[in-house]
Amino acid sequence: MLVAVGTDHHPFTRLIDWSDSYALDRPDVEVLVQHGASAAPASAAGTAYFEPGGLAAAMTGAAAVVTHGGPATVAEARDAGHLPVAVARDPELREHVDDHQLRFVGRLDAAGLVRACSSYQQFRSTLDKALTQPDDFRLPDGAGAGTAAAAHRAGGLIDLLTGAHRPRPDLPLPRPDAHAHEQWPAITAVVPTRDRPELLRQTLDHIRAQDYPGTVHTLVVFDGADPDRSLERDDGGRPVRVLASTAAPGLAGARNTGILAAGTEMVAFCDDDDLWLPGKLRAQAAVLGAEPDTEVVCCGIRVAYDGAESDRVLPRTAVGFADLLRSRLTELHPSTFLLRRSALIGGCGTVDEGIPGGYGEDYELLLRLSRRAPIRNVGEPLVRVLWHRRSYFGGRWQTIATALRWLLTAYPEFRLVPRGYARVAGQIAFAEAAAGRRGAALRWSAAALRARWSEPRAVLAAAVACGLPPGAVLSAVNRRGRGV
């Protein structure tokens, strides 16, 4: 009998103990355990790993196969002709960080694809049956084929959400004054603009004032307007060039125009109403210089709204895909992005110009980038972000609702993260309520509360649908440096 506990970093002591107990109860049965990161079994024969292809070969030769709840291992057992006995890690027993394996194995059991066991008594009786009635636990030839590819895709997703690929939130950052390179690389700042000349000039002044030792090129991209050539500067260390957007109208197209026109590997975003504070580029470039695998670095923000300012700093230095599904993490504002151009062009792609109204294009880009590598974050407020009533999306509630529905369709992974799904559903509900669509608002509020009963946006949306002015809600949360 073969027991595959898995090789990730999560120990599975309970399944090891069950294997030991079964080996003691059935000395006539040889129990071989792939224990991975778990402690080796005492009574059963144990091996920490198999050579490539060895696990599949061992499964083929075994009379019965027990697997943990990993989809790839389940699929491998089925491809070897077994109906596997599956034991999922239980988060209530501190065996995993969430209940994805429990839910996954429960669905497979209901579909007859595994035999799930949740207690030792059930485990023992199921294995006894597998050994005495082996035909009930063998699949017809070819019945398990074709499941491995899908299961490996599911396994990759689960790794992104819960497994070893999730970054440590406290990964240390290199110090800016410890930059090992002889020369600081040139950076291109991409500044899309539309009808805000006074704010734009302040933005350019702060880019010019960066204490970054290297060259900072600035590309001002005019979206839907003629470029203002008076902004151009032929400064050796801080040159400024203006150009008209050549892509789709909107923020995404303007950013892509700048990305494509940039002549440097490092590219930074800055909106035309935001201000970079001293030290921003130096701190971030030190991270990219020291970490070749890092593709994007963000930092904290200082939110200015209606005469009040508040700092929003993310208390972690690394962010993964699962973190961004759970929360938008507003601290990771697009005006804080410093990216490798190659991560976009020839990597995950440039900013998506097909998102309805262009709303949330920065968040969607972060989701794509975080699939490839952790996003790094400097825990200081190094960008002043202006929130004001002239925001491009201010009052465009139907566009916001449509874009957020697009996001849930484009990223079905939200369904695996109830907190994240409830957040987006609550935002849709609020936008629908603010647009005067009471029925849609209440339906989305209910969907958010089903996913997470304590979702505050659902409650706010219901209140707005019942007559509370949306502007009053937005003003209250914006003064605290928050959004809906």
Image: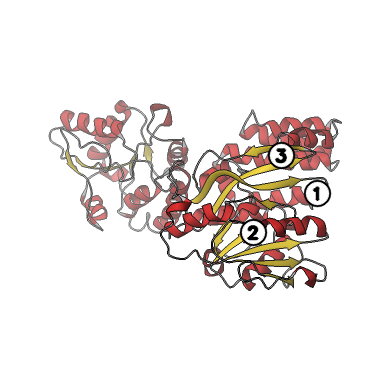
Q: Depth check: give the residue in front, 455 or 140.
A: 455
Question: Mark 2 belongs to which amino acid?
Answer: Phe
The disc, 2 or 1, on the residue closer to the chain's N-terminal end is 2
What colour scheme has been applied to the protein in the rendered image?
secondary structure
The answer to which of 305 and 447 lies nearer the viewer is 305
- Position of residue 8 in the picture relative to residue 17 (left or right): right
Mark 2 = which residue? Answer: 269
| Residue under pointer 3 | 483
Q: Percent position (x, y) of residue 216?
A: 60, 65
Q: Earlier in the sequence, mark 1 or mark 3?
A: 1
Q: Name which residue lies at 12% across and 35% down.
A: 28
Instruction: Identify residue type, mark 1.
Output: Gln
Marks 1, 3: nearer the viewer: 3
CA–CA distance in space, label 2 to label 3: 21 Å
Q: Position of residue 248 (x, y in %)?
A: 74, 68
Q: How many marks?
A: 3
Q: Residue at x 70, y 47 (%)?
A: 385
The residue where tag 1 is placed is 398
Q: Secondary structure at mark 1?
A: helix
- Whichever of callouts 2 and 3 sits on the residue coming sooner in the sequence is 2
Q: Please state the horizontal and vertical placement of residue 347, each as a whole percent of the image.
A: 52, 66
